[in-house]
Structures are given as structure tokens and as C-alpha cells.
Image (spheres, rainbow, N blue to C red):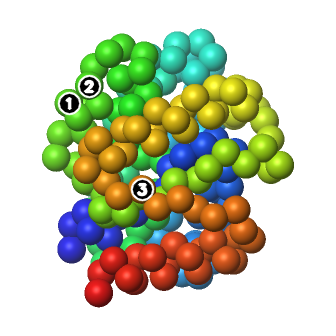
């Protein structure tokens, strides 16, 4: 099986990825929460400084490490595993901050050929204790991912701005079509 059943949901912060992930989980699929949110929760609890608003490089390196562990843990499992962000996001973030090419950080770790990209969706965008940046930063990050994913050999599938039920149907139908 390997990486062919590991599916990356990426794109704009606040674009509805977490909601989509919850819907896929409710349908019985394995899901992996965004590394960034888990790191922020851990660092806030422990008083650590690997936080995007304190030490962005340390945060990006930590996200890369966590995403690699997530990827490895799911690589040999049966069925689809959906990732809310992952290695690609962390590597692209690190490249933006340090200049280290994303392709070097990724090594041979791959996801399914089709990567699902959440577009900016200002109507549902919210900040909270774990997401403090504004819409402008979110869109800039989205635009970097939009360039990086095809450059890394992925086919970008844009998630439609529809209900979460329709989004989940769309993702599953697109994956079914890709594996025929």
C-alpha cells in the first residue's frame, strides 16, 4: 500500500480542512490532526517557545519532525488516512523561513498523487488561541503551497466551497476515480 493511501489536505488556513477531517473521521476513515495545532497545544501547556509567534523556525522544524512521525506511523495501514497538513506544509514553511529547499526536507516521503487544496474562504475564517495570524498571512501561505505542490510532483485538486458533506463526497469520489 505505502504512500498511495496517505492523503494530504492542505491549503489556506481557515479554509475548512479541520471540519472536513472531522466529517471523514465520522465516516470511519483514519485522520491525522494538523501538526501545528498539536505543537501549539503542547508548547502552551509546557511553557515552551517553539511557537509560530515566538520562534517560527523552531516551530517549522518541530512540525516537520511530527509530520514525518505521522507519515511513518500510517504508511503500512490499510485504507485511506487523511492528513490535515503534513510534511509538504512543514517543508514549504521551512523553505520560506530558511531557504532550505522543500524537496531536501521531504526526502522520499510521499502522499497520494492527488493533494486536496482548501482555497481561501474569508466567510468562515476565524482566529483562535492556536491560530493567531490574519487572513493576509494565510493567503500568502496558500499561494506558496499552490506553487510548491505541483513542483513536488503532486496533482492539486481544489476543494469546492460547498457544505462539508459535499466536500467529503467530492474527496472520496476524486480518490476513487484516481485509483480506477
Q: Position of residue 103 (x, y in %)?
A: 23, 34
Find out whether the residues at labels 3 and 2 contact each other: C-beta distance under 8 Å: no
Is 152 left or right of 34, judged from the image as shown?
A: left
For the point 54% across and 46% down, the residue is: 11
Q: Position of residue 43 (x, y in %)?
A: 58, 27
Quadrant of the image containing the N terminus: bottom left
**CA distance separating discs 2 and 1:** 6 Å
For the point 67% across and 77% down, the residue is: 166
Q: Position of residue 86 (x, y in %)?
A: 42, 46
For the point 74% across and 71% down, the residue is: 163
Q: Nearer the viewer, residue 17 or 121?
A: 121
Secondary-structure class at tag 2: loop
**CA distance separating discs 3 and 2:** 20 Å
- In the picture of the structure, the residue carrying the numbered disc 2 is 101
For the point 16% across and 46% down, the residue is: 108
Find out whether the residues at labels 3 and 1 contact each other: C-beta distance under 8 Å: no
Crowding at dot 3, Cα within 10 Å, few <14 / some 14-19 / many 20+, comes out as some
Quadrant of the rendered image containing residue 136 = top right
Q: Residue furthest right?
A: 123
Q: Which mark is residue 156?
A: 3
Find out whether the residues at labels 2 and 1 contact each other: C-beta distance under 8 Å: yes
Q: Position of residue 162 (x, y in %)?
A: 72, 68
Instruction: Give the mark count.
Output: 3
Q: First in sequence: mark 3 or mark 1? A: 1
Quadrant of the rendered image containing residue 65 = top left
Secondary-structure class at tag 1: helix
- In the picture of the structure, the residue carrying the numbered disc 1 is 104
Q: First in sequence: mark 3 or mark 2? A: 2
**Do we see residue 139 in this rendering?**
yes
Amino acid at each position: 500500500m505505502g504512500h498511495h493511501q496517505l492523503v494530504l489536505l492542505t491549503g489556506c488556513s481557515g479554509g475548512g480542512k479541520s471540519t472536513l477531517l472531522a466529517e471523514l473521521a465520522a465516516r470511519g476513515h483514519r485522520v491525522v490532526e494538523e501538526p501545528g495545532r498539536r505543537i501549539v497545544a503542547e508548547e502552551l501547556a509546557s511553557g515552551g517557545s517553539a511557537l509560530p509567534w515566538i520562534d517560527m523556525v523552531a516551530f517549522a522544524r518541530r512540525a516537520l519532525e511530527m509530520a514525518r512521525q505521522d507519515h511513518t506511523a500510517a504508511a503500512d495501514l490499510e485504507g485511506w488516512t487523511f492528513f490535515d497538513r503534513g510534511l509538504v506544509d512543514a517543508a514549504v514553511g521551512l523553505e520560506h523561513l530558511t531557504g532550505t529547499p522543500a524537496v531536501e526536507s521531504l526526502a522520499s516521503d510521499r502522499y497520494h498523487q492527488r493533494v486536496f487544496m482548501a482555497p481561501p474562504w474569508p466567510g468562515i475564517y476565524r482566529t483562535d488561541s492556536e491560530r493567531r495570524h490574519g487572513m493576509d498571512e494565510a493567503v500568502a501561505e496558500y499561494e506558496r503551497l499552490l506553487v510548491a505542490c505541483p513542483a513536488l510532483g503532486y496533482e492539486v485538486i481544489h476543494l469546492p466551497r460547498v457544505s462539508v458533506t459535499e466536500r467529503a463526497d467530492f474527496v472520496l469520489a476524486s480518490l476513487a476515480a484516481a485509483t480506477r
